[in-house]
Image: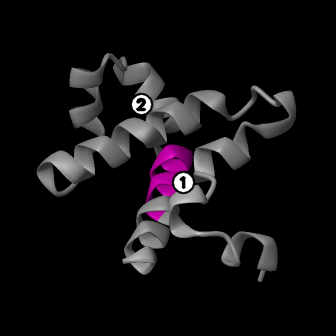
Amino acid sequence: MNTALTSMKPETLIRISDLVTAHGNKKYEPAAQMAEAIIALTHEQGGCLPQDLNTHGYTPDEVFQHWHMAKSLAEVELKLSRKKR
C-alpha cells in the first residue's frame, strides 16, 4: 500500500481521476471526466446507468467507448470516499 497516500489527511487525498490524467497523459482523460459525472450522479440519485450520462452531455457513442473504464474509476473513488468516513 502506498504510505504517502494513506498518511495524508482525507481532505487532501488526490482523486483517482487526477492520478489517471497525471503527467500530461491525455489518453484516459475522457474516461476520467466521465467518472466524475458518474460520481456526481451517484451522489445525486444513488447510482448511475450508462443512459444517465446523456443528461450530462455525453453522446451514446462516447458512453459506449468510455463507460467501462469510467465506471471502474468511479467505483474505486466512491469506495475510497466511503472508507474516509
| The C terminus sits in image quarter | bottom left
User: Is residue 21 in the magenta section?
Assistant: no
Q: Quick one: which residue is furthest to the right in this view?
A: 23
Q: Position of residue 36 (x, y in %)?
A: 44, 39
| Residue 29 seen from this side | yes
User: Is residue 74 in the magenta section?
Assistant: yes
Q: What stretch is highlighted in magenta?
A: 68-75
| Residue 2 seen from this side | no
Q: Where is residue 21 in the image (x, y as percent from the top left)?
A: 72, 37
Q: Give the residue drawn at x 86%, y 35%.
A: 23
Report the amino acid beneath label 1: Leu
Mark 1 Cα shell of 10 Å, populated few (<14), some (14-19), many (≥20): many
Q: Quick one: which residue is furthest to the left in this view?
A: 45
Q: How far apart are marks 1 and 2 (CA)?
A: 14 Å
Residue highlighted by disc 1: 73
Tell me the number on the disc at residue 63. Answer: 2
Q: Where is residue 22 in the image (x, y as percent from the top left)?
A: 78, 39
Up the image or down, 71 lies above or below 6; here it is above
- Foreground mark, 1 or 2, reads 1
Q: What coloring was used for the rendering? A: one colour
Which of the 4 quarters of the picture holds residue 52?
top left
Report the amino acid beneath label 2: Val
